[in-house]
Image: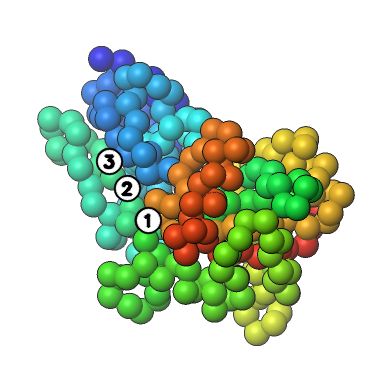
Amino acid sequence: MPRMLDVSEDVRAEIGDEEADRLLDGDNAPGNYDCTSCRTPGDSEQERTSTVLFVGEETAVLAFAHASCIPSQVVRVAEEQLQGAVASITASDAADALSVSHPEQAVLGVTSGLVLIQGELHPALVVEPTAPVARPGSDGLVDEFLPLLAEQGFQQVMDLDTRPAVLPGWSVLVAMGQLHSVLQPGPGGAGQAAWWQAHQPLQVTDGWRAAANKSHTVLVFAAPVGSIGQQPREDLLRDALEKAAANGRLVAAAMPLAGT
């Protein structure tokens, strides 16, 4: 059965027309999947679904996502990040099938929204990984996302009505009305480096951009995988943030706006 799949030109160029057409025809695409962005179930027979191709030096891993979460795209990652991927073969002929999996290496999902604090709307970004984040060099069994951010200066959020403190050396880059990256201090204090980089610049709303230009500051909230999810409305996003804060699973920092 044909699937409601979006296959971008970049993905088609990587996997070839024949494989792309087989996906669209339903030969190699699963009906049900876990979204590689928000990690909630999806159904390519019932809703628009993006094909997301993770490409390393030697390995290519195809994953699926709700089209409302992220567009179909090619994501370049280090080869070692794909080695731990758990592949499931969906076609009957494994020799010709493309591996469909979700890399164990976490990808940072970012959602923009406006958060009301003490009667004023603040532009915010909510960062949530797609998988547990292990400390480099560890056995990978413990999610260290929040402790790692705490070591960078992020503060635990106890009350969503309190504006987080500014984190020195960090900033949020917005250019031409699109979100490009979150920047952190570079190694050895040399300039800045991307902590998170959009694979494709993300559009922000006019309201978000206006609030950012007014305050010249963006609030960045971060929570472990499974804490926030993809919320369709800002009131639901706030409810999820408040729940994560109450459970001790939310950190935040204020960052200067770079760009316009």
Residue furthest to the right: 214
Q: Position of residue 4 (x, y in %)?
A: 38, 20
Contact check, label 1 and label 2, Cβ < 8 Å? yes
CA neighbours of label 1 inside 10 A, class few (<14), some (14 to 19), many (20+)? many
Tell which tag, 3 or 2, sits nearer the viewer.
2
CA neighbours of label 2 inside 10 A, class few (<14), some (14 to 19), many (20+)? many
Residue under the point 14% across and 37% down = 94
Residue under the point 41% across and 28% down = 49
- Considering depth in this image, is 130 or 228 the residue closer to the camera? 228
Residue furthest to the top: 1
- Considering depth in this image, is 224 or 239 the residue closer to the camera? 239
Contact check, label 1 and label 3, Cβ < 8 Å? no
The residue tagged 1 is 131
Q: Position of residue 228 (x, y in %)?
A: 47, 48
Q: Position of residue 202 (x, y in %)?
A: 64, 42
Alpha carbon of mark 3 to alpha carbon of mark 2: how far? 7 Å
Identify the secondary structure beneath mark 2. Answer: strand
Identify the secondary structure beneath mark 1. Answer: loop
- Quadrant position of residue 236: top right
Three-letter residue code for mark 2: His
Residue under the point 36% across and 39% down = 40
Above-or-below relation of 192 to 96? below
Q: How many labels sit on residues? A: 3
The residue tagged 3 is 100
CA neighbours of label 3 inside 10 A, class few (<14), some (14 to 19), many (20+)? many
Three-letter residue code for mark 1: Ala
The residue tagged 2 is 102
Residue 255 numbered mark, or none? none
Does the image show residue 105?
no
**Relative side of 22 to 222, left or right:** left
**Which corner quadrant holds the N terminus?**
top left
